[in-house]
Amino acid sequence: MSEKNGEMMSDFIFSTSNLEKSNPIRAIQSIYSEEKPNIQEFYGEWGSLIVSENMYDGFHPFVNEQYIMIVIGGPLLMFRDNNFIRNKGSFEGTKAIFDRWKENKIAWDSDLNGPYSVLIIDKKKHEYTCITDLMSFIPIYCFKGTQNKCLASHIDMLAKVSNQTKYKDEVSIIDFLLHGVVTYPYTFYKDIFQLQPATVHSISKSKSNLMSNSYWIPKEFNKYKSIAEAAKQLKEELENYIEKITDETENVAQFISGGEDSRTLSSLLKNLERDAYIYLDSMNREGKIARKIASKYMANFHVSTRNKFHYLNILPSCSDLVGSGSEYRHAHTYGFHKELKSYDAVFGGLLADALLKGSHIAKKRISKRLPFLPDKKDINFSINKSLTGNIFPARLLKELASRRERHLEYISEFREKSVDEWFELWPSSMNRNIPNIHANRRLFKSYEPFLSNQIVKISASIDQSWKLNRRLFHKTVKPLLKPTKWLLHSDGWLPSLSWHSNVFVHFTTWFYRQIGKRTGFIKGNQGPWAEWKTLTASKRWENTVNFYIRNSEGISKELLGSIEKALDNDMLTTFQYVALTQSLYHLQMRTS
């Protein structure tokens, strides 16, 4: 048995039985293609715990005679200072959480802020407690065998140590191909499920059931009397979150773009010496605007360019890192992350659109085709509109439709009017962009202000109409955008103006760019991401898909035949094709 206060954790595998023969170290290290993390093991009559190191300081395991506590991620502690976040080798943060838990004072929805998971092991009583964060930004997966119960923070690690890699769930595979996510609580494996968010889960060796008690649910109600009141609190929460980190750090960085979220971030960080990073195919319109923003907000601008096959090159390594059922393509820092490891904190603007600007509200198609027009909610929203056609076996599509309807019914219990939005937000694994967090937190000290607990709560307690057309967001950040008041967003509008003031501006730039593309006056990729249609149409991508198909195992001939039919008849969208490629990689690698 090995027990000592040691390394930090990015991931863990826990079992009520002994896992030494299952080679759990190899399972954890398998998700990293290059630098393998240090591993710490704990074994005893109570079971097994294997944890890997990460970038966050202050959250090493805390161990005493009776308990082991681990904290995954780097949450901010709101009940005290965070002066330990640059103390290498420290478990001060973990111990502070443990003490507050032992005193029965812990409030999981407010005392810990941001992505986290906590595991508490009572070695004497053989009782175990796992706490998931507000939105399951760090998802935890569970397998219940006949002789043991296992938990892990990575789906494929858990499948390996529980001998489930051969038992693929074909309904989930189709779900991922069509939607880029796997409907909660299902996974790529038949007998592995995701734990509920914002919940204290209790396990005992002596009881077969997992006991779960929610500590927060995003119930639908409008907490604020006006947009101005909500905007005031939103701005304060952003400032407080960033200040709590920057008070304890010396060298920080941020991600920058031509958009408004990074401008907001830049303004909140403008009094700090910092570096600003952007990753592009080449220096283009997006990069030029970002460079101007960095200059206006006094940041040191850095641009890195990608090889044209970058996203194909990183597919194996990045897919391993984020796991089956998570779209690897959202891990935009992968391949550039080594330069970020030296920073005390790296700030991003993820989920501002999802939580505050209604990007997951079902909208009428005309506002998607003509982006200068105001967004209007689609009251004829259908959760299963993508399941039409006969690409895949009818019995599998029927089960998938049933799963999605059940999740919709579950969300409607507490979000009747906004069920369309929260279907894709709760838990966060239903949001196809969330693998960005899954990758970054394992690679460097990533902090995302818009994932703050209080901002999640604000998002849950305002009317959808306040999110549409940036009404709340614009009211909140307008004072922060003054230095770039007349600098266009890379999409062709002015973030400092409200949506109605932007209609003419946006129409003018949209029309100019449409004409420019058709006449060849505007050439090349002007945006921040890859040209996916060009990339996936390449012979190299096609050869990769064919190789994976030839080596696929663990799925039926019926499903494989459907996939080949879809490919032969060009029946998938670009991103469904990308998801298919990633799925085929997992199928041939995970069972070989």
Image (cartoon, rainbow, N blue to C red):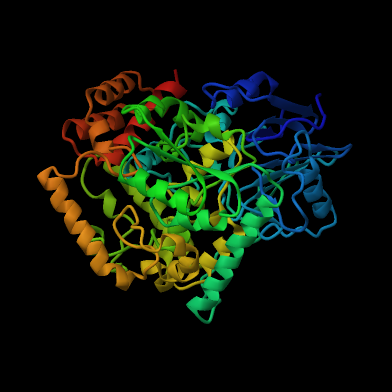
Q: What residue lies at 34% left-to-right and 28% top-to-bottom?
A: 556
Q: Position of residue 292 (x, y in %)?
A: 40, 50
Q: What residue lies at 16% left-to-right and 34% top-to-bottom?
A: 569
Return the residue found at the far right. 65
Q: What residue lies at 36% left-to-right and 28% top-to-bottom?
A: 310
Q: In this view, does 389 lie to the left or right of 222?
A: left
In the rendered image, the vertical position of residue 388 relative to residue 556, given as above or below = below
Q: If the image is split into quadrants, where does the C terminus sit?
A: top left
Q: Is residue 118 left or right of residue 466?
A: right
Q: Where is residue 561 in the image (x, y as percent from the top left)?
A: 25, 29
In the rendered image, the vertical position of residue 368 relative to residue 467, given as above or below = above
Answer whether residue 179 is visible to the viewer in this image.
Answer: no
Q: If the image is split into quadrants, where does the N terminus sit?
A: top right
Answer whether residue 327 is visible to the viewer in this image.
Answer: yes
In the rendered image, the vertical position of residue 364 relative to residue 129, given as above or below = below
Q: Where is residue 39 in the image (x, y as percent from the top left)?
A: 69, 25
> In terms of depth relative to the viewer, which is nearer, 366 or 236?
236
Occupied quadrant, residue 342: top right
